[in-house]
Amino acid sequence: MSGNLSLNDAANRLGVTPAEVMDAAGLTLGELEHFAELDGFDAYQYRQVPVLTDHDMNAITARLTRP
């Protein structure tokens, strides 16, 4: 999943919290923990796993900027 952004990176870039990014992305905690384990992280490190693509970031940005 190289080249993608983690929840933490996306949150920093957008000036929001990782939880807001997670909600806007439509990802569940279970999905993110699973991705973390697949990438060799512990499940609790899910916010550090690069899972968000450019397409995801465009959708997240649009959802977060809606009135």
Image (cartoon, rainbow, N blue to C red):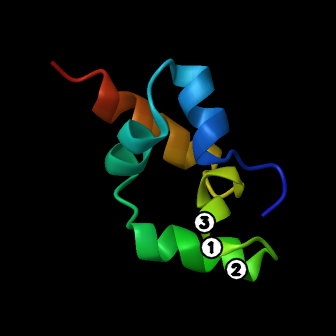
Q: Return the residue at label 2.
A: 37
Determine the residue positioned at 61% across, 24% down: 12
- Image disc number at residue 5: none
Q: Quadrant of the C terminus?
A: top left
Q: Which of the two discs, 2 and 3, sits closer to the camera? A: 3
Q: Do the residues labelled 1 and 2 touch (CB within 8 Å)?
A: yes
Q: In which quarter of the image is the N terminus?
A: bottom right
The amino acid marked with disc number 1 is: Ala
Q: Distance between the residues labelled 1 and 2?
A: 6 Å
Is label 3 in a helix, a strand or a loop?
helix
Is label 2 in a helix, a strand or a loop?
helix
Horizontal and vertical percent for residue 8?
Answer: 62, 39
The amino acid marked with disc number 3 is: Tyr
Determine the residue positioned at 40% across, 43% down: 19
Horizontal and vertical percent for residue 40?
Answer: 82, 76
Q: Please, is residue 15 above or below residue 9 in the view? A: above
Q: Please, is residue 10 above or below residue 52 in the view? A: above
The amino acid marked with disc number 2 is: Glu
How many residues crowd mark 1 within 10 Å: few (<14), some (14–19), many (20+)?
Answer: some
- As drawn, is 39 to the left or to the right of 48? right
Q: Return the residue at label 1.
A: 43
Residue at the far left in the pictured view:
67
Query: Hey, which quadrant is residue 28 in on the image?
Result: bottom left
Q: Do the residues labelled 1 and 3 touch (CB within 8 Å)?
A: yes
- Image disc number at residue 44: 3
Q: Please, is residue 34 above or below residue 17 in the view? A: below
Determine the residue positioned at 35% across, 30% down: 62
- As drawn, is 53 to the left or to the right of 21? right
Q: Which of marks 2 and 3 is nearer the N terminus?
A: 2
